[in-house]
Image: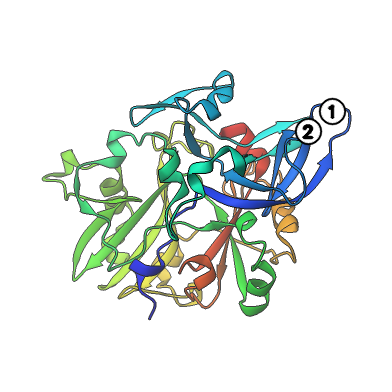
């Protein structure tokens, strides 16, 4: 069985890449559209060309503005995060073209030329992943690190990072689509009859009384999670609705929970074998087929509506392999995701 510790995904915010194409933008004299992996991004015309080596910064990267190489970004917005004054890269749309991330000539970063294998470029450049602040009623009191012996930390790789393996993944596995729900990742564990609760990074302390319970514990009680979940089982899902995130994008009046992963003794359970009581609260399964290419997978979710609330856009799709297999190309995850770019522009 694959080790959760060795295969648990760590998002590479900063990577050395090659520009694979440049496309002219109609009625734009100063900018072009470049392709890096599966990402489209707007660049200054003639700053980079096909075949050039670039340092690519993914969306959600928080770039320190004290570094003069990033100072040009300050007029576009600045945000202090973990005590660092910086700029957060978001999905944008310019002249009708989506831009996701930042590509800069590799020659601007000579300090990266001497890195040893395995060194993290983001750490060297002081780049971190920007995380929205979690409300106190969600976070609660931390009792320890995320309990990885029961389940990995949640996460799914974006399809734009899978251009080299996407076709093979489509061939090697069968896939089902579920709606990507905008919320806070929450994990419930039945540890020998005792309920344990964790967020994305940390496990939360058991409240001393119902009056002191934070939202995850209240939802666990409301949904009777311990009764739904057999001993030795773990369920992971999204806690969403009013008060969970600053933007309640699904316009939900209360707080709800939808499951997307189930594990038994640390092993992923295929959705077809989930306990019926957990399937009742599972993320919506969509009647869709995995497209043939990354570009088609991104286009498929463009502007898609939520089945939970058809009046608003869905965040996107998570594709799960039906066998619940941990896939090495996905860093041991069982799924990958395609995010709705229109949703990103509106809610980033």
Image quarter in which the C terminus is found: top right
**Residue positioned 45% across, 69% down in the render:** 332
Q: Position of residue 141 (x, y in %)?
A: 19, 42
Q: Which residue lies furthest to the top in this view?
A: 75
Give SS at disc 1.
loop
Q: Where is residue 172 in the image (x, y as percent from the top left)?
A: 63, 79
**Residue positioned 39% across, 77% down in the render:** 2
Does 63 sit above or below residue 196? above
**From where the camera sits, is residue 253 visible?**
yes
Does 38 sit above or below residue 261? above
Q: Position of residue 153 (x, y in %)?
A: 37, 58
> Which residue occupies the foreground of this view, 51 or 327?
51
Classify mark 2: residues with Cα within 10 Å, few (<14), some (14-19) or many (20+). some
Q: In this view, does 206 lie to the left or right of 55?
A: left
Q: Mark 1 points at which residue?
A: 28
The tag earlier along the polypeptide, 1 or 2, is 1
**Residue positioned 54% across, 21% down in the render:** 74
Q: How many angstroms separate mark 1 from mark 2 (CA)? A: 9 Å
**Residue positioned 72% across, 36% down in the render:** 42
Q: Name the residue under label 2.
A: 45
């Amino acid at each position: 069985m694959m080790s959760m510790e060795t295969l648990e995904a760590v998002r590479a915010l900063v990577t050395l890449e090659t520009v694979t194409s440049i496309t002219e933008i109609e009625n734009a004299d100063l900018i072009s559209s470049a392709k890096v992996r599966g990402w489209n991004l707007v660049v200054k015309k003639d700053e980079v060309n096909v075949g050039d080596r670039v340092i690519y910064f993914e969306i959600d990267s928080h770039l320190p503005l004290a570094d003069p190489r990033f100072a040009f970004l300050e007029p576009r917005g600045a945000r202090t995060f973990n005590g660092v004054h910086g700029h957060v890269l978001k999905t944008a749309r310019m002249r009708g073209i989506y831009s996701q991330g930042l590509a800069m000539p590799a020659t601007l970063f000579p300090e990266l030329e001497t890195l040893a294998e395995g060194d993290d470029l983001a750490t060297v450049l002081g780049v971190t992943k920007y995380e929205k602040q979690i409300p106190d009623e969600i976070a609660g009191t931390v009792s320890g690190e995320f309990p990885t012996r029961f389940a990995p930390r949640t996460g799914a790789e974006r399809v734009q990072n899978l251009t080299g393996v996407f076709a093979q993944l489509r061939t090697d596995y069968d896939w089902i689509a579920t709606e990507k729900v905008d919320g806070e990742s929450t994990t419930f564990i039945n540890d020998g009859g005792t309920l344990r609760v964790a967020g994305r990074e940390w496990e939360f302390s058991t409240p001393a009384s119902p009056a002191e319970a934070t939202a995850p514990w209240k939802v666990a009680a409301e949904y009777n999670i311990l009764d739904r979940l057999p001993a030795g089982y773990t369920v992971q899902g999204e806690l969403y609705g009013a008060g969970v995130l600053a933007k309640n994008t699904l316009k939900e009046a209360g707080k709800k929970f939808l499951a997307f992963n189930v594990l038994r003794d640390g092993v992923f359970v295929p959705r077809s074998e989930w306990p019926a009581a957990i399937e009742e609260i599972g993320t919506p399964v969509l009647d869709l087929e995995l497209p043939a290419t990354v570009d088609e997978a991104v286009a498929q979710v463009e502007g898609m509506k939520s089945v939970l609330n058809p009046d608003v856009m869905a965040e996107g799709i998570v594709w799960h392999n039906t066998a619940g297999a941990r896939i090495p190309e996905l860093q041991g995850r069982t799924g990958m995701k395609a995010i709705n770019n229109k949703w990103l522009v509106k809610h980033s």
